[in-house]
Image (tube, rainbow, N blue to C red):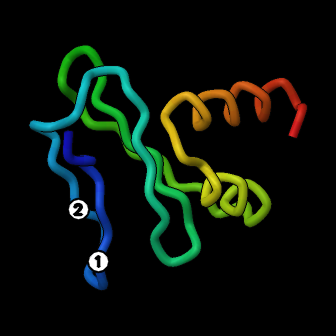
Amino acid sequence: MEYPVSVDENGVNLKPEKMEKEKLYHCIFKNKAMLIFKDSQDVLNCYEIEEMDLVEQIKKIDSHDDLEKLFEDYLKGNT
């Protein structure tokens, strides 16, 4: 399945029709991490993270499960 979030020189590109509901997607744009998900009512939600330590950790993420674990650990204060 094609990843529904991409970036180019103009910004972040989304394909919401290819997004699963309640699944977190991410990309890096201009040294910021962008987190996007489609909720149960098909509303897109986007969050921008500028904290460099966290952005660097997100850059290393290879899978959806790793991304969720990173945020679980971050919220618990383990990162």
Image: 25 above or below 60: above
The residue pinned by badge 2 equals 13
Q: In the displayed structure, would residue 51 be above or below residue 38? A: below
The residue depicted at 88 percent of the width and 31 percent of the height is 77
Q: Which mark is residue 8?
A: 1
Q: Secondary structure at mark 2?
A: strand
Q: Tell me if mark 2 has few (under 14), some (14-19) or many (20+) residues whose alpha carbon lies within 10 angstroms of its own.
A: few
The mark that comes first in sequence, 2 or 1, is 1
**Picture quadrant of residue 12:** bottom left
Residue at the image position 27 percent from the left and 36 percent from the top: 44
**In the displayed structure image, the side of residue 65 where residue 15 appears, left or right:** left
The image position of residue 47, as x and y in percent, is 48, 47
Quarter in which the C terminus is drawn: top right
The foreground one among 59 and 47 is: 59
Q: Is residue 27 left or right of residue 77?
A: left
Crowding around mark 1 (Cα neighbors within 10 Å: few <14, some 14 to 19, many 20+) is: few
The amino acid type of the residue labelled 1 equals: Asp
Which residue appears at 25% of the width and 26% of the height? 20
Left or right side of 57 for 29: left
Q: Label 2 is placed on what type of residue?
A: Asn
Separation of residues labelled 2 and 1 (CA atoms): 8 Å
Who is closer to the viewer here, 1 or 79?
1
State the count of labels.
Answer: 2
